[in-house]
Image: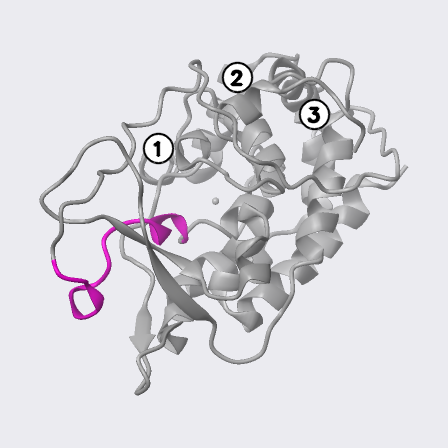
Amino acid sequence: MEARSEPISRQHHRKEGLGTTGRWALVAVVLLGAGYAGWHYWGRAPAALETPPVAAPAPAAPAPTITEPAPAAPAAEPAADTSHPLEPAADAQGRPPLAGGDGDGLAQAVTEWLGRERTLRFVATDALARRIAATVDNLARSQAASRLWPLHPVGGRMAVTQTDDGRMEIAPANAARYEAVVRFVVGLDVEQAGVLYRRVYPVLQQAYEELGYPGQRFNDRLVAVIDHLLQTPEPPGPLALKLVQVQGQLAPQQPWLRYEFADADLQSLSAGQKILLRMGVEHTQRIKAQLRALRAQITRR
């Protein structure tokens, strides 16, 4: 992707059947659903794997809100070698495209689609278009801050096992955490979603430009990020982990640790690719198949 000035999204640290008003959200769900259950990558190690308490720095202070910038992080940019213009269009019911900036229209569509209870449970409806645009953009970068995600975090932590020789690995049982959301994502009707995506495209386009990409197309970025995610490796066997102490400014009573891939090449992958890796190969392959189908819809002229 061509060089550009630092976007606001980088400054920020860089959801079985479909209703007729909400299928547009597939675009976000397919990309974001892959990481839906992966937000608890950070945190203290499980008790069996903890190191003795030591005086250590605390995590950094709570992340700022969407409107406040945070320090920039290194970026992993996908290469965009093709232009993919997309024209907004009415949906199957003849409803015209939403106007750019109609964030209330997006939130209303999601609530009508999911129902109020499920919306409150899963969706962060405040600044939804901005969240979608920023997260799609960030999936190909080194970090995709959870405070910007359109979906609320899921409880639980990554399942880890320790081998006889002391190595830590992602446990085979960890993939079960993702089964429900993967089943949801692959059950979405991609062809119908393409129609709805065109209807709401002006809202996402404006949100994307407001992140710091004036004159650039959100659809181009979406296709580039899909292509980037499709390049995620599928290493056989358990994935080895290591514990890394989080650096901060304050010293807590207990150290805060995070898991990282022991393989330096895997650890150097983007946030989105590492999310797919943590899901397990089978789930990754199912998500990739849906991403390919989605790509075919949003690149159709």
Q: Earlier in the sequence, mark 2 or mark 3?
A: 2
Q: Is residue 129 left or right of residue 148?
A: right
How many angstroms separate mark 2 from mark 3 (CA)? 12 Å
- Residue at x-position 32% and y-position 39%: 121
- Which residue, as the protein is rendered here, is positioned at the far left? 253
Q: Going 52% across and 22% down the picture, which residue do you hit?
A: 11
Is residue 47 shown in magenta?
A: yes
In the rendered image of this protein, does residue 36 appear above or below residue 114?
below
| Span colored in magenta | 38-52
Mark 2 or 1, closer to the camera? 2
| Tag shown at residue 201 | 3
Dot 1: element: helix
Q: Position of residue 102 (x, y in %)?
A: 57, 13
**Between marks 2 and 1, how big is the CA–CA gap?**
17 Å
Label 2, on which residue?
103
Residue 69 visible? The answer is yes
Q: Main secondary structure of the magenta part?
A: loop
Residue carrying label 1: 116
Front-most of residues 238 and 296: 238
- Marks 1 and 3 close (CB-CB < 8 Å): no
The quadrant of the rendering that contains the C terminus is top right
Mark 2 or mark 1: which comes first in sequence? Answer: 2
Q: Percent from the top left, x then y, of residue 132?
A: 55, 31
